[in-house]
Image (cartoon, grey):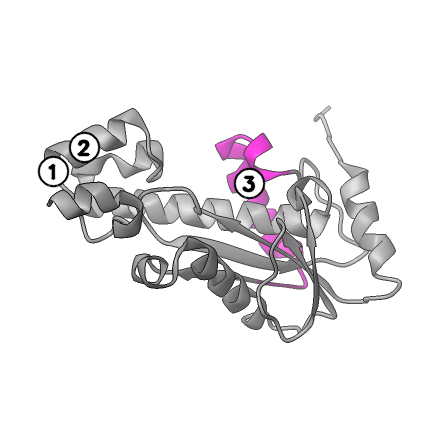
Amino acid sequence: MARIILHKELFEYDSELRSEYPVICGVDEAGRGPLAGDVYAAAVILNNNVLINYLNDSKKISEKRRELLYDEIIEKADAYCIASASVQEIDELNILQATMLAMRRAVEGLALKPDLALIDGNRLPELNCDSRFVIHGDAVSASIAAASILAKVSRDRYMRKLDSDYPMYCFSQHKGYGTKLHYEKIAEFGISEVHRKTFLKKIYDQK
């Protein structure tokens, strides 16, 4: 018999809020810290009838499990949207503002307008609906946890695509984060157009 893990408290958190806000979307981002690549965000609207086994903070789930959950979330969500802000926007605006931009694009791209947006973290983007932030929200709210999965899987897939375009940097291994391998590749091949210049300012200025 298959093992089922259901984090009921995640769904209960959202369910209690729906008595006041019938349509809730969870919002989360992926890729704030890396040295390369766009920052991603996702918004997901679930309803009280939806339960998803193994749903949790994306960082606590294996890559294989995240891929399976990605498909299930898309199938069961009332609405979802995945958005991003580019490397150029990150360098022009700064990473915080670019992340807020990606989140706003995700919420505004939903097919349904939410009554409330639950934002992971401690900052709020400017939205056309009520919003509140939830610290460690991907471990508190099912909607945010679902958004964290969509954002993380989408960005990982994007980084694998960049790996095929820029194989010398091994993006599929480190996903753009500042690992020893990544810095070694930057030292060997220089900074590419998909690297965040403001994150590598000292190296970029030397170049």
Mark 2 lies on a secondary structure that is helix
At x 20% / y 53%, what residue is drawn? 193
The residue at which mark 3 appears reads as: 68
* Residue 109 position by quadrant: bottom right
Q: CB under 8 Å between callouts 1 and 2?
A: yes
* Residue 203 position by quadrant: top left
**Highlighted range, magenta:** 57-80
Q: From where the camera sits, is residue 83 visible? A: no
Compute the Cα span from label 1 to label 2: 6 Å
At x 57% / y 39%, what residue is drawn? 58
Q: Amino acid at mark 1?
A: Phe
- Classified by dominant secondary structure, the portion drawn in magenta counts as helix
Q: Position of residue 191 (x, y in %)?
A: 17, 45
Compute the Cα span from label 2 to label 3: 32 Å
Tag in front: 1 or 3: 1
Residue density around tag 2, few if under 14, some if 14–19, many if 20 or more, within 10 Å: some
Q: Position of residue 49 (x, y in %)?
A: 80, 55
Q: Amino acid at mark 3?
A: Leu
Compute the Cα span from label 1 to label 3: 35 Å
The residue at which mark 2 appears reads as: 185
At x 15% / y 33%, what residue is drawn? 187
Residue density around tag 3, few if under 14, some if 14–19, many if 20 or more, within 10 Å: few
Mark 3 lies on a secondary structure that is helix
The residue at which mark 1 appears reads as: 189
Report whether 18 appears left or right of 178. Answer: right
Q: From where the camera sits, is residue 75 visible? A: yes
Tag in front: 2 or 3: 2
Residue 145 marker: none
